[in-house]
Amino acid sequence: MSLVKSIRVSIALALALTVSVSGVAYAADPSIDANAAGKIEGSGATFPWNQYTDWFRSFTDENTEGTPVTTGTSLAQFHPSNSTASLVLNYTGGGSGAGISNFFGAARVSPTQMFSGSDSVLSSSQRASIEATDIGKKYSVIPAITGPISVVYRIDGLKTSAGAAATLRLNGSVVCGIYSGSIKKWNDAKIKALNPTVANLPNANINVVGRSDSSGTTFVFASYLGKASSAAQKNCGYQSNFTSSTEANFNDAAGTFLPASTAPGTYFSAIRTANGASAITGKPGNGGIAPYVKATNLSISYVESSYASKYGLKEAALAAKTKRGATTVYLKATTASVTSALNNSVVKEDPINPSSSYVQPVFAAGVNSYPIVGYSWWLIYHEYNNANGVTLGQVQGMIAFMEWALTDGQKSTYLYKGYTPVPAAARTKAIAELKKITFNGRAVWP
C-alpha cells in the first residue's frame, strides 16, 4: 500500500473539520470494503479539535492508497488506483452541548450524525432523554483523549521587580473571584498576594472572557472552580448545594455535585451585576476564545492547552491542591503534571460510561498534579443499519479510525502538544466497547 502525504482540511466558520480517506483495506481491524463510500460524520466538543485534526491527517496518510483527486468541491478526495470510492471523516464543532443534543436529536444515527464528542458528563436527565429514543440504552460513552485546560491571559509588559518577564500565579479562589466579579482589577490585593514578585500589576479592569455556547470545556472549568474555590464561594461550582470542603459530594450515588456547561456570561450575569462588575465577554468554542484573548490586552479566559500553544498565549501557573510542606506549589500544564493528576485523582469512577456523578479528574492531590484536567469522550451508538441511511463501509471506517486513535493515536508521535493519553486500562475497555457495534444486527468487528 502506498502512503499518500497529501490532505486538505476545510474549516468553516461553524468549525467543520473534514478530511478524506480511501475506501480500501486498512491496517487496523476491521477490514473495510474496497468500494465503501460516504461520510463518517460526528459533532460536538471543541476541546479535542486540534488532536482530531492531527489524528485525521495521520490516519489518512498511513491508510490511503492511490493519489488525491480534486473533485471540484471544497474537499480533496482520495481514491485507490482502481476505484473512485472514498470515505470522508467529518467532525463539526459547536460545543459539547450541541454534540449531546445531536446524539439523541432528530438526526440521530444518521449519515450526518454517526457519533458525538463531549467533555461533559451526561446528566441523569440527558440519559433519560437518550433512553426514551429508539436507541434506548444501546450506546457507549468512551474516552478518546485527555488534556489540561489553561487559564490564559494577556497583560502587556508584565514584569518582575528585577525587570524580567513575569508569569501570573492564580488559585481557585482568585479565579472564582474574577469570574464572579468580586475581583475586578488586575492589581486587586488578592492577586497581588499571590504574585509578590510582580512589580507592575495594572490598575485596570479585568476583561473576563468565557464561552458563549454550551461547552464541555466550561464543564471541566466549572468542576475546577467547584473544588478549588473556598467553601464560601460555592456558587462558582455551578451548584447551589455544593460545599467544597465536603469531598463526598463528588462521589455519592445521588450526584449532588454536577457542574454545568452553562455559558459563564449567562450563569454569572446576576452575580456580577450584584458585585458591580461588567458583563463577561462571550465567544464560541476554544477556537473563538483563543484569538480574542491574543488580540485583547487585560483579558483572561480558559482554553484547552493546545490552543494556548497554538496561539502563543500566556498561561497562568495554578496552585496545586497539595502543598510542599507549608509552601504552595504553582504549576503549568505539562505531560508529567497531567499524568500525575490522572493517577492521583480522588475520583476512581470508571471513565467508561460515567454516571451523572462527578467524574473529571480536576484538583487532584499531589504536589505535581496540574489542577484542571479533563477527559473528552465519544458517544457512539451500538446499532447502525440500512434504515438509518448508513452503510456497512461507513461503520467499518468509523471503527477502524477509532481503534487506531485508541492505540497508535495515543503514542507521543501522534499526540498534538497539549494533549495526553487516556490511561491504558480505560483504553482497553474503550476498544471492547467498539466491539459492541452492530450493523443490521450483526457484529461489525467480531
Image (cartoon, rainbow, N blue to C red):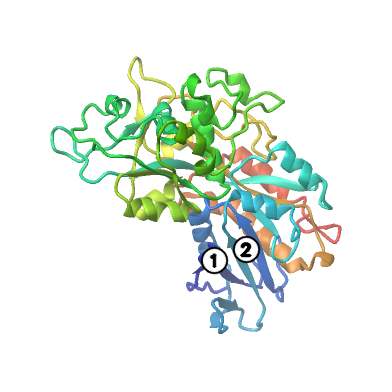
In percent of width and height, residue 443 lies at 81, 56
The kind of residue on which mark 2 rests is: Ala
Left or right of 100? Residue 420 is left
Give the position of the C terminus as an image quadrant: bottom right
Q: Are marks 1 and 2 in contact (CB under 8 Å)?
A: yes
Splitting the image into 4 quarters, where does residue 396 fall?
bottom right
Mark 1 lies on a secondary structure that is: helix
Residue 27, numbered circle: 2
In percent of width and height, residue 203 lies at 24, 36
Disc 1: which residue:
62
- The structure residue drawn at horizontal position 42% and vertical position 31%, both measured from the top left corner, is 275
Dot 1 alpha-carbon crowd within 10 angstroms: few under 14, some 14 to 19, many 20 or more: some
Mark 2 lies on a secondary structure that is: loop
Left or right of 192? Residue 50 is right
Q: Inspect this view and state whether residue 416 appears.
A: no
- The structure residue drawn at horizontal position 80% and vertical position 64%, both measured from the top left corner, is 388
Q: Earlier in the sequence, mark 1 or mark 2?
A: 2
| 71, above or below 441, in the image | below
- The structure residue drawn at horizontal position 51% and vertical position 49%, both measured from the top left corner, is 212
